């Protein structure tokens, strides 16, 4: 804990530099959060430009800069810990950027999120004009002006799926570094996520001990893989941990400014994920509970609690309103879940607000009375119950097998996907299996079982200490446990790795890493003092080495006896950028008819910036003529199957490309990758609807066989 310096000891330049260094990790975190909030704000009103986002972010950083305190007195350990954290996270960002993903073909979420980011680089709104594609597609039911799920029409605009905060943020990278800046931006987010773990852990552990959980997260295959592509989870991790940090500080320091910043950050989770209310609810309940258990003037605590409830709720519901405006089709598809989340959050808000108002008449005594009644034994019992619950969830593979239903089209589709994965891996075919009983084991894939078991102990200790010693431990529990328990029981996801672990990246992964460090250092406190220094070094090394052991698998006698984690060593979708840019260069400045490959619809519409129609079946020459008339221009047809159309002569391949992807693996980290070959043909629609082949242009093809 830093102490004010005596008047007789004026700060030197070296002292001031050390103090700024100690404050740097949290200020870097603050800078990214404010930039993300500014980008998300302007994207939500369709005014996302450098002239709106960057000045807003600059003003926000200036206004909040002093919220992060500069310590007056700094210890050598604080200086060393901050230096290692800053340099380490910077090195991590550079290493991740070396193999940034080229996720530009829409197979899963990072595809449309990246493309939305590319679009927002040069456009203030994420709505993409159809530009005559609706009229052109009207010639046949198999022709579409959008593409299933990922791209949906709203009036005469095509809307990418999902919330906009991440896409708006990575678009800022495009203003700095062009297309590559967009592709690399999430690597920076992942690095700041490592700092967020460090800064939050620093509230509970020493400045050096808090490096251990940060290292464990940084070296986990999941954090590396999910940060290289435009997954929303690393930024969600940043928001959740930053909110927990500032709410924790606001409660302990009795600072309304810090509480407001934490409340805004927690509410902003709805601007990035449709399940943002689940994260925000845990943070809100924890904050109110911590305020109820904290000593201090009752009127101040009531005002602080009501302020957090109001600010966080306003921001959260604004995020859902923005989701419905900018991704109406997606919001409508998941309306049942979204409405349930919003209603649940609203009910929680109402209950908490009524309880807080009752504090005026002594209603907070319900919390303090329960704490006093529990006493030391009761607090230990509560902690034991939390750890016991997590152990029970971890033991489920011994006594249950989870299945999904067959009642709707989504379940049937998922069952088919799972069956294909099972057959590919030579597993027993049981397509309705969700593998939900293994969700705690999934965490061990990335952190290892020793860290998971220590984390289970650590959550129990945090519960005990919240009751007995420090109410703000509730913020660690509220930030990480509610969504962890929810998704441990029912992850509602296709269960292949790395995809399925997305559910656990924002809160569970850092939560277990921090809780494990808390438990480890608690155990170290019980080691004989003569051995303690060496034991601490060994423990710190274990938090580095254990996640590294998951990078390599050694299975003697297997087809691949030694294999490595592909999310670490392979560029995801390497070759996709070259393929799409080559397709755009085939016949520039023409409308596009994409025949048969929906995964490339958004890729072509965004990167070529030309109106695009997706044809899911062969089109007749007269229909192509009608499409040309609708556009008042001769479109180019791009297809991988030339037999769909009539040609003036046999077409040649204009773009040949190989794209790498990590394998789809059940019950393990992916350790293989596959290469998907693409061969594209192109033709210009003639006056009679017959295609004139575009001649291959030498090295137009994008050949990518290794990163």
Image (cartoon, rainbow, N blue to C red):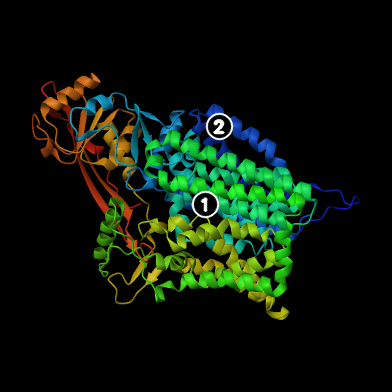
| Residue under pointer 2 | 53
Q: Which structural element holds mark 2?
A: helix
Quadrant of residue 285 within the rendered picture:
bottom right
For image coordinates 20% across by 20% down, the residue present is: 629
| Res 278 label | 1
Q: Nearer the viewer, mark 1 or mark 2?
A: 1
For residue 208, which quarter of the picture?
Answer: bottom right
Residue sitting nearer the eye, 625 or 341 = 341
Q: Using the image, determine if residue 142 lies above or below residue 575.
A: above
| Horizontal and vertical percent position of residue 566 | 37, 59
Residue closest to the eye, 369 or 80: 369
Of callouts 1 and 2, the N-terminal one? 2
On the question of residue 218 being in view, the answer is no
Q: Quadrant of the N terminus?
A: bottom right
Please rate how many residues cluster around mark 2, counting C-alpha atoms within 10 Å: few if below 14, some from 14 to 19, many from 20. many
Q: Is residue 462 left or right of residue 469?
A: left
Callout 1: SS: helix
Residue 260 horizontal/vertical position (percent): 67, 43
The quadrant in which residue 702 appears is top left
Q: In this view, does 492 lie above or below 443?
A: above
Residue plotted at (20% across, 32% down): 637
The image shows residue 565 at horizontal and vertical percentages of: 39, 62
């Amino acid at each position: 804990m830093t102490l004010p310096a005596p008047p007789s000891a004026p700060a030197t330049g070296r002292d001031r530099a050390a103090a700024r260094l100690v404050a740097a990790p949290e200020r870097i975190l603050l800078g990214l959060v404010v930039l993300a909030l500014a980008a998300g704000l302007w994207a939500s009103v369709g005014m996302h430009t450098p002239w709106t986002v960057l000045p807003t972010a600059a003003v926000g950083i200036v206004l909040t800069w002093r919220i992060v305190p500069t310590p007056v007195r700094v210890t050598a350990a604080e200086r060393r810990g901050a230096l290692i954290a800053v340099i380490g996270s910077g090195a991590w960002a550079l290493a991740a950027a070396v193999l940034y993903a080229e996720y530009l073909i829409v197979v899963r979420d990072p595809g449309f999120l990246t493309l939305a980011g590319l679009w927002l680089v040069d456009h203030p709104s994420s709505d993409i004009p159809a530009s005559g594609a609706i009229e052109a597609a009207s010639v046949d039911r198999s022709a579409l002006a959008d593409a299933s799920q990922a791209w949906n029409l709203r009036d005469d605009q095509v809307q990418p799926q999902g919330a906009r905060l991440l896409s708006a943020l990575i678009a800022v990278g495009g203003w700095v570094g062009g297309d590559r800046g967009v592709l690399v931006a999430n690597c920076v987010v992942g690095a700041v996520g490592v700092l967020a773990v460090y800064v939050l852990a620093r509230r509970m552990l020493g400045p050096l001990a808090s490096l251990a959980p940060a290292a464990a997260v940084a070296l986990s295959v999941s954090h590396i893989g999910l940060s290289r592509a435009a997954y929303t989870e690393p930024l969600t991790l940043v928001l959740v941990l930053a909110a927990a940090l500032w709410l924790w500080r606001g409660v302990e320091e009795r600072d309304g400014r810090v509480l407001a910043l934490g409340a805004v950050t927690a509410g902003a989770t709805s601007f990035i994920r449709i399940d943002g209310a689940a994260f925000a609810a845990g943070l809100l309940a924890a904050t109110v509970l911590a305020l109820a258990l904290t000593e201090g003037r009752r009127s101040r605590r009531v005002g602080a609690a009501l302020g957090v409830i109001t600010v966080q709720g306003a921001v959260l519901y604004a995020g859902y309103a923005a989701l419905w405006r900018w991704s109406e089709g997606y919001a409508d598809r998941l309306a049942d879940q979204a409405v349930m989340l919003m209603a649940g959050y609203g009910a929680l808000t109402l209950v908490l607000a009524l309880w807080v108002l009752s504090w005026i008449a002594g209603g907070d005594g319900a919390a303090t009375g329960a704490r006093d009644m529990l006493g030391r034994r009761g607090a230990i019992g509560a902690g034991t119950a939390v750890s016991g619950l997590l152990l029970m969830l971890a033991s489920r593979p011994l006594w249950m097998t989870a299945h999904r239903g067959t009642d709707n089209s989504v379940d049937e589709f998922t069952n088919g996907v799972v069956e294909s994965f099972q057959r590919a891996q030579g597993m027993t075919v049981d397509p309705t299996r969700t593998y939900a009983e293994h969700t705690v084991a999934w965490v061990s894939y990335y952190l290892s079982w020793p860290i998971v078991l220590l984390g289970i102990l650590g959550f129990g200790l945090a519960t005990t200490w919240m009751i007995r010693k420090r109410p703000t431990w509730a913020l660690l529990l509220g930030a990480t446990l509610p969504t962890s328990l929810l998704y441990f029981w029912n992850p509602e996801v296709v269960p292949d790795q790395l995809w399925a672990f997305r559910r656990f990246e924002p809160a569970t992964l850092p939560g277990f890493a921090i809780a494990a460090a808390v438990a480890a250092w608690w155990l170290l406190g019980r080691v004989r003092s003569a051995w303690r220094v060496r034991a601490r070094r060994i423990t710190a090394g274990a938090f580095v080495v254990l996640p590294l052991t998951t990078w390599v698998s050694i299975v003697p006698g297997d087809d691949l006896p030694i294999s490595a984690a592909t999310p670490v060593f392979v560029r995801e979708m390497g070759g996709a950028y070259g393929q799409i840019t080559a397709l755009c260069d085939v016949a520039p400045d023409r409308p596009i008819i994409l025949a048969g490959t929906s995964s490339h619809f958004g890729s072509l519409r965004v990167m070529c910036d030309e109106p695009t129609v997706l044809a899911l079946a062969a089109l007749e020459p007269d229909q192509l003529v009608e499409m040309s008339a609708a556009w008042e221009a001769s479109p180019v047809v791009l297809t991988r199957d030339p037999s769909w159309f009539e040609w003036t002569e046999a077409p040649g391949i204009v773009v040949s490309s190989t794209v790498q992807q990590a394998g789809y693996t059940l019950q393990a980290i992916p350790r293989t990758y596959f290469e998907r070959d693409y061969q594209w043909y192109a033709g210009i629609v003639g006056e009679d609807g017959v295609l004139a082949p575009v001649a291959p242009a030498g090295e137009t093809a994008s050949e990518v066989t290794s990163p």
